[in-house]
């Protein structure tokens, strides 16, 4: 009999303390989260920011009886919502990587399937790590970090459920969510933790939404690369088909290269609104530098060739013509290949 009693109490205390330790380690509120992006626009690599219009749905367990008594199964908003939220615990959050406080359009609260559901639609301007060295090729990560501040991880923790891009209920409703020359490549949502500067370095839950977008480079091919490659090809053609040994070619040679040289900064200026200004050299910057070097070298060789013609220095004239017609013709694609290797490999 004593053995049975001792076994019973041993089993009881084992279950009790195991359950107690579970409750201590687990947060009081698991907040399920769904994120829907209505619009992603004004993606600015130069400034390292973009703008979003977002719908967020948070659901959690709680004492729903006061809500049901007051509002039944209705959806509340406005003053009724604000007053009721003062009476209960609910998840409060901020956008951690926002440039400014978010602009909330509306919030609603209701009870569904025995849980509270807090819905909010808001807009925000977010900062990003805008490193895209292969521009206009490559991808860009657009993060939105939602940080809980109504309690540490012992009180609440986000449980990511789903990330959605746009409303797809009506197939006739053709709405482009991601604006500009970008398209969706991948989407992910996850929960993490972040240490706070105050509260003794306590950890708070973070909901991280990641939208990976791919840049559509077709437009850049026509407005950037086609003009630049045309300038380089014209420069090489002038070098090869306007030799200095024929009278009158000096004007064509020097004048043509000078014209191409002046077109390059004018083209850069004309495309300033299309090209990002970054703290690093991206692929487009390197192509501009490559074209400038080729044209500049062709111009210098043209000026030197004309000088040697006037001085009747045949040996140096032949050397400059060899550099212009052979060396530049070979080195131009080699330098371009080196740029490709540096950027993409």
Image: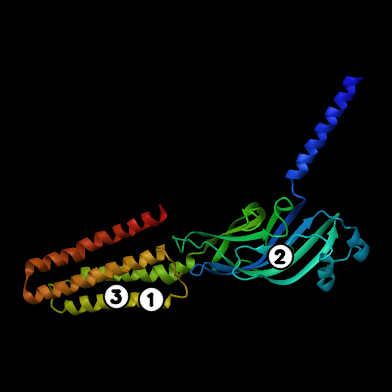
N-terminal-most mark, 3 or 2: 2
* SS at circle 1: helix
N-terminal-most mark, 2 or 1: 2
The answer to whether one can see residue 51 in this image is yes
Q: Which mark is residue 245?
A: none
Please state which of the two labelled residues, at mark 3 or mark 2, is closer to the viewer: 2
- Quadrant in which residue 333 is drawn: bottom left
What is the x, y in percent for residue 326? 20, 61
Which residue is drawn at the image coordinates 81% and 65% (left, top)?
Answer: 85
* SS at circle 3: helix
Mark 1 lies on residue: 267
Q: Residues within 10 Å of mark 1 (few under 14, many from 20)?
A: some
Mark 3 lies on residue: 261
Residue 289 vs residue 203, the one in the foreground: 203
What is the x, y in percent for residue 278? 44, 67
Mark 2 lies on residue: 55
Q: Does residue 92 appear left or right of residue 79 in this picture?
A: left
């Amino acid at each position: 009999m004593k053995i049975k009693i001792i076994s019973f109490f041993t089993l009881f205390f084992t279950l009790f303390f195991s359950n107690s330790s579970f409750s201590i380690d687990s947060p009081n509120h698991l907040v399920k989260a769904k994120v829907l992006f209505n619009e992603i626009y004004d993606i600015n690599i130069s400034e390292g920011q973009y703008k979003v219009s977002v719908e967020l749905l948070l659901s959690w367990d709680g004492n729903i009886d006061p809500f049901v008594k007051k509002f039944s199964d209705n959806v509340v908003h406005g003053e009724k919502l604000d007053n009721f939220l003062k009476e209960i615990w609910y998840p409060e959050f901020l956008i951690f990587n926002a440039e400014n406080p978010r602009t909330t359009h509306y919030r609603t609260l209701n009870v569904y399937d025995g849980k509270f559901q807090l819905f909010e639609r808001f807009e925000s301007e977010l900062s990003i790590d805008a490193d895209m060295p292969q521009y206009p090729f490559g991808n860009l990560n657009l993060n939105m970090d939602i940080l809980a501040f109504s309690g540490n991880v012992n009180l609440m923790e986000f449980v990511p459920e789903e990330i959605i891009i746009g409303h797809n209920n009506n197939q006739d409703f053709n709405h482009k969510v991601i604006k500009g020359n970008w398209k969706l490549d991948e989407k992910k949502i996850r929960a993490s933790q972040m240490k706070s500067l105050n509260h003794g370095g306590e950890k708070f839950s973070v909901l991280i939404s990641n939208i990976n977008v791919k840049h559509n480079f077709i437009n850049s091919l026509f407005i950037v690369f086609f003009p630049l490659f045309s300038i380089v090809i014209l420069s090489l053609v002038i070098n090869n088909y306007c030799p200095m040994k024929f009278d009158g070619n000096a004007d064509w040679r020097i004048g043509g290269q000078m014209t191409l040289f002046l077109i390059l900064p004018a083209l850069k200026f004309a495309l300033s609104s299309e090209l990002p200004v970054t703290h690093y050299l991206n692929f487009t910057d390197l192509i501009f530098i490559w074209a400038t070097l080729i044209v500049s070298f062709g111009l210098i060789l043209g000026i030197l060739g004309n000088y040697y013609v006037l001085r009747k220095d045949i040996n140096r004239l032949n050397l400059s013509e060899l550099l212009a017609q052979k060396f530049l013709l070979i080195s131009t694609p080699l330098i371009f290949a080196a740029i490709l290797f540096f950027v993409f490999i």
